[in-house]
Amino acid sequence: MNKERFLRLLNERILILDGGMGTMIQSFKLNEQDYRGERFADFPGQLKGNNDLLCITRPDVIQSIHRQYLDAGADIFATNTFNANAISMADYAMEAYVREINLAAGRLSREVADTYMAEHPDRTIFVAGSIGPTNKTASMSPDVSDPAYRAVTYKDLYNAYKEQVEGLVDGGVDIILFETTFDTLNVKAGLEAAEVVLKEKEKDLPIMLSLTLSAQGGRSELLQDALHPASGVFLQPRAHDGHAVQKQRQAARQADNVENGHTWPPVSPNGPSIHARGLHEILTVFLQ
């Protein structure tokens, strides 16, 4: 992946992210056997619902979903690894398979992207390694009677994120994407882990954040930010389906023709765009 090309494209136009993975998987109506495959046929406990495991047991399903989003016009698509960390995988007693899942997800996504670009030489596709927030929070206690208690430590999060980032980078992703962040202390551990991994592996990959924040009135807002020094960069909220991706691409084309100082930043069909530099300044305060 050429990072300079990625940053240049971001400055030229809005790049479109793919949509939800879980809802697309549900459309395949998979059963327990699909999730298990032959390899995990005798694994204890229920595995249905462990969507990340499908990168190993049903890679054809995941590849099909990726291609559907690319056909709809997505420039960036995320690996099926939202919960592929040791903390979340503990729900299925599958912590030992975290690296393998991330490695498989990265490799199959890399194959989809490279094959698609070979078939469509006019398209540039980027693979984002999806990293979810885990199912625990480091900033708050889950026990109202013991506000000092924490279900997870910063070190736990750092180690879990580091293992996941290593697998994704080795799998060949172009971008590190922290998705649906709701606890800035969690993502701070993730950012530190990502920086260490990239330094150890002598890689220079962009890091992106997706944040879910509560606005006044209790409404949740999804914000996207690309962590790089380029100013005037905009990332749209993620689409929820292929049709929305196409609508966002149309909005992006229209925005490219708008002069600075007029209707800028542009507004997408699904809500306002977020100025990356302004959000980055907010994040800098949160993550210090």
Image: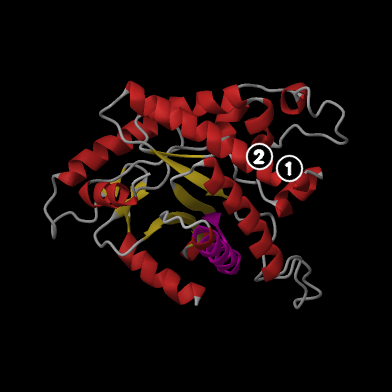
Where, by quadrant of the figure, is residue 104 drawn? top right
Vertical placement of residue 246 versus 219, above or below: above
Vertical placement of residue 153 versus 256, above or below: below
Considering the numbered disc 2 on the image, is that residue within a helix, a strand or a loop? helix
Identify which residue, 243 or 224, lies in the foreground: 224
Q: How is the image coloured?
A: secondary structure
- Main secondary structure found in the magenta portion: helix
Q: Position of residue 105 (x, y in %)?
A: 58, 37
Query: Mark 1 is on which residue type?
Result: Tyr
Residue on which the image places disc 2: 101
Vertical placement of residue 206 versus 147, above or below: above
Q: Is residue 109 magenta?
A: no
Q: Residues within 10 Å of mark 2 (few under 14, many from 20)?
A: many
Magenta region, residue range: 180-198
Q: Is residue 200 left or right of residue 86?
A: left
Q: Position of residue 241 (x, y in %)?
A: 45, 32
Considering the numbered disc 1 on the image, is that residue within a helix, a strand or a loop? helix
Q: Position of residue 141 (x, y in %)?
A: 73, 70
- For residue 27, say whether it is visible: no
Residue on which the image places disc 1: 97
Vertical placement of residue 77 versus 195, above or below: above
Q: Is residue 28 left or right of residue 145?
A: left
| Residue at 31 percent of width and 34 percent of height | 247
Where, by quadrant of the figure, is residue 186 drawn? bottom right
Query: Mark 2 is on which residue type?
Result: Ile
Q: Is residue 193 magenta?
A: yes
| Residue at 69 percent of width and 35 percent of height | 53
**Mark 1 touching mark 2, by CB under 8 A?**
yes
Q: How far is the residue under mark 1 from the one under mark 2?
A: 6 Å
| Residue at 19 percent of width and 41 percent of height | 254
Identify which residue, 61 or 165, lies in the foreground: 165
- For residue 41, say whether it is visible: yes
